[in-house]
Image (cartoon, rainbow, N blue to C red):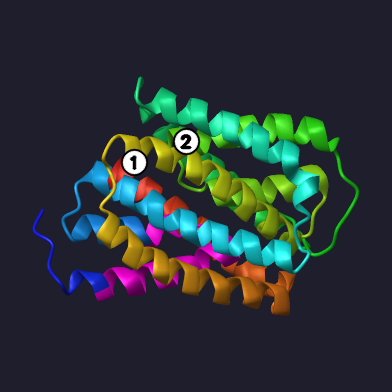
Amino acid sequence: MIFQFWYYPVLFLTAFFAGLVDSIAGGGGIITLPVMLSLGFPPHIALGTNKFQASFGSFTASYYYIKKDVVILKACTAGIVFTLIGSAIGTWTVTQVSSDVLKYIIPFLLVVIIIYSFIKTNLGENDRQARMKEMVFYLIAGLTLGFYDGFFGPGVGSFWAITFVAGLGYNLKKATGYTKVMNFTSNVVSLFIFVLGGYVIFTAGIVMAVGQIAGSKIGSELVIKRGVKFIKPIFITVVILTTMKIIYDRFLH
């Protein structure tokens, strides 16, 4: 591809906005990937470069949530380990088999999240009793969602957040913090595979990483200050937009 100088400010602003949204409710990929593809990035290069810049955003958000005691890292060690394993298996598997089946299933799962969010009007407003033991929860969720993120990916932040709320009884602010830690874990595994394959344009990735870091920091601060009532409408909006984007790509494009 021919890389024009004006691409850099466009990529920076795109990554900044994606980092802002992603740190609040997930779904930054639905912003960055279409822009990168429209600029002429080959699909595999766009995916690899996107993972590179997204890793910086998820790290920044994770660090901020840990620093503000929203996330206790020791409490989710098992989740990190199982997500790492699941993501590694998923990333390896997608290089061996087609992901077409998942592309049909995922939109329907996201629709279920939308319906659940509207039915449960008090979704994630307060902590409540956990329905599962943490080790069992992380074994199932870490392996399953880690695998999914490595294998396909869209909507994984929404799946993690709703799973934390439903399984461990976290409020939505706390669920968002722990989601970013799991996102960072699976991002790093996938990034490692993409780098080995030569699928990352580092100049573009670094510019976008700076934008991601700035956007993620601001977004995380907004979550800390404004809490669940601020997150919920953004969360539902991002899930709806992610669903529409996947349905369009899969069935209408």
What is the tally of numbered marks visible in this picture? 2
Q: Secondary structure at mark 2?
A: helix
Per the image, the residue denoted by label 1 is 195
Q: Callout 1: 10 Å neighbours few (<14), some, many (20+)?
A: some
Q: Where does residue 245 sit, x and y in percent of width and height?
A: 38, 53
**Side (left or right) of 38 relative to 153:** left
142 vs 9: above or below: above
Name the residue nearer the viewer: 252 or 6.
6
Task: Check disc 2 and give the amino acid type.
Answer: Gly
Q: Secondary structure at mark 1?
A: helix
**Who's the residue at 19% across and 47% down the image?**
42
232 vs 82: above or below: below
**Side (left or right) of 219 relative to 166:** left
**Who's the residue at 78% across and 62% down the image?**
122
Per the image, the residue denoted by label 2 is 150
Q: Quadrant of residue 68?
A: bottom right
Q: Is residue 77 magenta?
A: no
Task: Check disc 1 and give the amino acid type.
Answer: Val
* Prevailing SS of the magenta stretch: helix
Q: Where does residue 31 sit, x and y in percent of width and height?
A: 38, 62
**Side (left or right) of 171 relative to 65:** right
Tag shown at residue 60: none
Return the disc, 2 or 1, that comes first in the chain's sequence. 2
Q: Where does residue 161 sit, x and y in percent of width and height?
A: 66, 52
> Which stretch did the figure color magenta?
9-31
Q: Quadrant of residue 81?
A: top right
Name the residue nearer the viewer: 91 or 249.
91
Residue 111 in view of the camera: no
